[in-house]
Amino acid sequence: MHVAELWRFPVKSLRGERLAEAELLAGGIPGDRVVHVRTRDGRVVTSRIRPHLLSLAGTLGPDGEPLIDGRSWRDPASLQAVREATGADVLLGRYEELDRFDVLPLCIATDGAIAALDIDGRRLRPNIVVGGVDGLAEREWPGRRLRIGSAVIEVVKLRARCVMTTFDPDTIEQDRSVLQRIVDVFDGRTALDCRVETPGLAAIGDPVELLR
């Protein structure tokens, strides 16, 4: 098995960016999901209910500043683009505590499960895609550990999936049958919620080992 893809999502619910390498730390990949869209009373707004957020690209600049479509997230034009995507009077804020993640700091998907689902793997919004995995082998991994590059990752549980999987990452068109298939065939769960046990560096092509 090997690292096939690495992803970071600097702005929660926006499109992410592919990486050649990434640090895997206790807080996940540095710069992942550090800017949020919020209502004025502090509630986080996501693409579950405002799917057009997926039409905007979140990246990280060389100075570590999150960007929205290439502009600083602090740029008034970035806020305007987010408000147009949500159709709401929302705000942007930076927040780097661990509870910024929906569940755990890392989501790992496998090429075997993606192929079995017959979907674009970006619908699952993984941080890491492990290649060379036989079919649905990931379903036997919770409770085990993975060595990825120089890091050791604890696989905690299969991830329960939501309506975000139904939106095409390019066109934002909705196909509800995707989530229905995940529910009917995969008990509503696919890909893995993970935490970093031993920090390290991972790069595309690095070996991935299931530890005993």
Image (cartoon, rainbow, N blue to C red):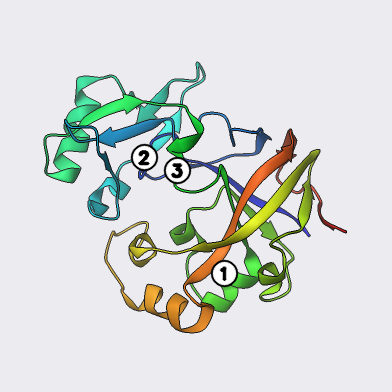
Residue 133, image x, y percentages:
73, 68
In the image, what residue type sits under mark 1? Ile
Q: Is mark 1 on a helix, strand or loop?
A: helix
Residue 200, image x, y percentages:
75, 34
- Mark 1 → mark 3, Cα distance in angstroms: 18 Å
Q: Residue at 35% across / 60% down in the picture?
A: 164
Q: Is 135 drawn above or below residue 32 in the view shown?
A: below
Q: Residue at 38% across / 79% down in the picture?
A: 180
Q: Residue at 48% across / 65% down in the picture?
A: 120
Q: Is 61 drawn above or below residue 151 in the view shown?
A: above
For label 3, the residue is: 16
Residue 163, image x, y percentages:
33, 64
| Between 114 and 98, the one nearer to me in the picture | 98
The C terminus sits in image quarter? bottom right
- Mark 2 → mark 1, Cα distance in angstroms: 23 Å
The N terminus sits in image quarter? bottom right
Q: Using the rendered image of the protein, determine whether residue 73 is visible from the camera's viewpoint.
A: yes
| Between 139 and 32, the one nearer to me in the picture | 139
Label 1–label 3 contact, CB within 8 A: no
Residue lying at the far top in this picture: please name it: 63
Q: In which quarter of the image is residue 158?
A: bottom right
For label 2, the residue is: 57
**Left or right: 82, with 168 as reference point:** left
**Left or right: 156, with 120 as reference point:** right
